[in-house]
Amino acid sequence: MTEEPNEADRRLAASAQSGDRAAFEQLILRHKRSLYRLVRRYAGDADDAYDILQDSFVAAWLALARFDMRQPFAPWLRAIAINKCRDHARRRMVRRRLSMLFQQEGDFLASHATEPVGETDDIEAVRLRQLDEAIAVLPRLYKEPLLLTVISGLTQEQAARQLKTTTKAIEMRIRRAKAQLRQAVSDLADPESPSEF
């Protein structure tokens, strides 16, 4: 008599919880195809889906100690994958909103980005990468007000309350954040050009 799928998953999960990597690899092999299909449909892009799938399995390995053996393994794994899809979509939305912010302010990125010959998606990827790099080095003092207002949609007054400062301070910090991001992206696009203030 063959083992039920849920029972096989539980047996492998129990072994994996004890540190048996081979058992976890067996779980991956059992579920990767169906999980990939789910993630691929959610993400809409094969490369993104592959990255999300890898992140999902890493997260499952790290969270395995919290897996309840009384529950089926597959739904638990799917929940992790869906959360990783949501995280990915949020990060992508943040980058796009910031990119749109610059485009609304004179299409700054379009005039300064190094644009490879190729598809529009390649140009967008370069712009988003440059924005990611610029945001990474932005001081927290300026980054938080910018993200709270532009990304989270708070008003300057709400951001001021959350950051325990004044609306005027938030306004000034957002202005400085935008200026620093413009300069940083400009420097990334053309490191030989003199800085413009």
Image (cartoon, rainbow, N blue to C red):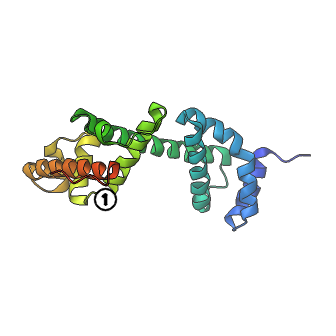
Residue 82 vs residue 12, the one in the foreground: 82
Residue located at (61% from left, 36% from top): 38
Q: Position of residue 111 (x, y in %)?
A: 29, 37
Per the image, the residue denoted by label 1 is: 137
Task: Identify whether 192 is placed above or below 153.
Answer: below
Residue located at (32% from left, 50% from top): 190
Q: Is residue 128 left or right of residue 81?
A: left
Residue 145 vs residue 18, the one in the foreground: 145
Task: Identify whether 134 is placed above or below 44.
Answer: below
Residue located at (30% from left, 49% from top): 185
Q: Tag 1: Cα neighbours inside 10 Å, few (<14), some, or many (≥20)?
A: few
Helix or strand or loop: what does disc 1 sit on?
A: loop
Please indicate, yes or no, whether residue 66 appears anywhere in the rendered image: no
Q: Is residue 125 left or right of residue 29?
A: left
User: In the figure, residue 18 lies in which quadrant?
Assistant: bottom right
Q: Position of residue 175 (x, y in %)?
A: 15, 47
Of the residues shown, which amino acid type is indicated by label 1?
A: Val
Residue located at (60% from left, 36% from top): 40
Q: Is residue 181 left or right of residue 78?
A: left
Q: Residue furthest right?
A: 1
Q: Position of residue 25 (x, y in %)?
A: 73, 56
User: In the figure, residue 150 lies in which quadrant?
Assistant: top left
